[in-house]
Amino acid sequence: MSIILNNAKYIDWKTLEIRDTDIKIEEGINGGIEFSKTPFILVNQTEDEIIDCDGRLVTKAFANGHHHVYSALARGMPAPEKQPDNFLEILKYIWWNLDKKLDQQMIEASALFTAMDSAKNGVTFVIDHHSSPFAVEGSLETIANAFDKVGVSHLLCYEISDRDGKKVTDAAFTETDNYLGQRQGLVGLHASFTVGNESLVRAVKLAVKHNSGIHVHVAEDTTDQSDSIKKYGQRVVERFKEAGVLEFNKTILGHCLHLDQKEKQIVENSPAWVVQNTESNLNNNVGFFNSIGLGNNIFTGTDGMHSDMIRSIQSAYFTGQHFDSITPVSAWNRLRNVQRYLKSNEFDGDSNNNLVIFDYKPPTPVTVNNFPGHFIYGFYSSDIQHVISNGKVIVKDKKIITVNENEILEFSKEMAVRLWKKLK
């Protein structure tokens, strides 16, 4: 089966070249696309699907470089027992309290909603960082199955940490080892200040075993640095470099807010990638991202705040006018770098047959030169009309069609109420 987009205005995600064309989309996880100025001849009248784009903009769908499925049921949750005064208290009284209460049903509901929300926002690939200390076994497969059901590709990891004791740490290593033996993924670590040397060494060895990389939060708050200096006599990036974390092309370093120039140089000279999460940093009041000195291997995520990558990169751009060096063009490239990361590491699920169709009606012409400006100042996720993932339509006329949205919302609400009772 093929999908044919008639009367499309295709924007090449790499060059921003715009062409008026019909597009034939091949189904499959590594499927391609074909362009033609004349209508394609239907091979199978009953199975081929035709979508008339009516001049709408079409481009490659988006990918989220850092998400937290486990936070999906937090929206509207009861206030914590203590109002947090700093980042460590935010973790202790909110996120570490929540993740300890999760069970497999709650994880499934969180994953189904996150995948569905991602799809409706034009995101067809999600890199996730999961935590559920007392529901570790099978958690990654639960998330993977939910994403598969919706039709969103994924690169998952479990957030290994020593904060909940050796039994939980060992369970996290077992879960990671088992999952990476069957699916593509990463070895997840929480952060330097919750991961001792033994676990750090084990994680690097596991990444080598599975030809993977490390996905870890780095210097999100100054506490991470002070803890590392006190315990190990090194700053976080120096510690990770010595342990071998930065030797993997697949390694993802989250946040990287509080790095000195030496650390930035180490990161720039490594094959590792940095993921920026502007709105989460603003929400937690931990600081502002500055890309200067980090090199070009930088992409963006949402850190569980939401699943809208358009909103995420627009926030990065506007905040960066004071704290970073960023233009509409470099913002677009930063948004797309996660897909360069996926392609360079040969991960499946982000081929050219992942597309998003925008019903964008601007008051001015869209050209190869001004498209980044249009994207930053004029695009909204509400403009998304259709989404195609791995050559299959998963959102049509703004509605998810692979799953029943109302059933998922009812399920997630039921699980949220149950979770909130446990939080009290």
Image (cartoon, rainbow, N blue to C red):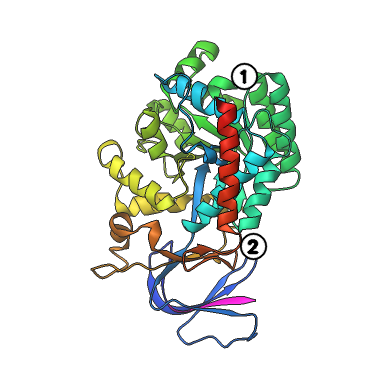
Viewer-proximal residue among 73 and 343: 73
Instruction: Identify the residue shown where x is 56% and y is 67%.
Output: 353
Q: Answer whether labels 2 and 1 touch (C-beta < 8 Å).
A: no
Q: What numbered label is drawn on residue 231? A: none
Left or right: residue 313 compared with residue 174: left
Stretch in magenta? 1-7
Instruction: Identify the residue shown where x is 30% and y is 40%.
Output: 319
SS assignment for the magenta stretch, majority: strand
Viewer-proximal residue among 105 and 301: 105
Residue 223 lies in quadrant: top left
Kind of residue sitting beneath label 1: Gly
Residue 132 lies in quadrant: top right
Q: Would residue 129 be visible to someone looking at this image? A: no
Residue 326 lies in quadrant: top left
Which of the image's four quarters has the N terminus? bottom right
Q: What numbered label is drawn on residue 29? A: 2
In the image, residue 2 lies in the stretch drawn in magenta: yes
How far apart marks 2 and 1 lie (CA) works out to 38 Å
Instruction: Identify the residue shown where x is 65% and y is 28%.
Output: 133
Instruction: Identify the residue shown where x is 67% and y is 20%.
Output: 198
Kind of residue sitting beneath label 2: Ile
Q: Position of residue 410 (x, y in %)?
A: 57, 49
Q: What element carries label 1?
A: loop
